[in-house]
Image: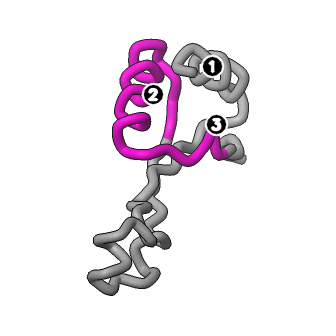
Amino acid sequence: MPDAEPLLHQLGTFDPAEATRLVALLEEHHVTFEIDTDQSALSGSNDFSGLQFGVNPEGAKILIFIPEPELARAQELLARLA
């Protein structure tokens, strides 16, 4: 019976600039991760006045998932960025 893949845990939801810094740190420390995006904020009101006055200023977010065995180490690395 083949080994099952480890359960993934969401490390957090990040804006693109923050995610870029975190991904570089995870790669530097050889932590395995997966990335997904949450674009739900983009599906809200897109009327011009709302965007112009900052009613809907939120953009897409980056979701980072970590395998369970590496989660504690990834959380320690995330704390370094704060």
From the top left corner, tell me how far across and down residue 82 is, in percent: 57, 21
Dot 2, crowdedness within 10 Å: few (<14), some or many (≥20)?
some
Q: Pointer 2: what residue?
A: 22
From the top left corner, tell me how far across and down residue 79 is, in percent: 63, 19
From the top left corner, tell me how far across and down residue 23 is, in percent: 41, 30
- Mark 2 in CB contact with mark 1 (< 8 angstroms): no
Q: Pointer 1: what residue?
A: 79
The residue under the point 33% across, 86% down is 47
Q: Amino acid at mark 3?
A: Pro
- Identify the element where label 2 is drawn: helix
Quadrant hosting residue 80: top right
The residue under the point 49% across, 72% down is 40
Whole-Å distance between the Cαs marked 3 and 1? 18 Å
Residue 72 in view here? yes
Whole-Å distance between the Cαs marked 2 and 1? 10 Å
Whether the magenta-drawn stretch holds residue 19 is answered as: yes
Q: Pointer 3: what residue?
A: 67
- Identify the element where label 1 is drawn: helix
* Magenta-colored span: 10-33
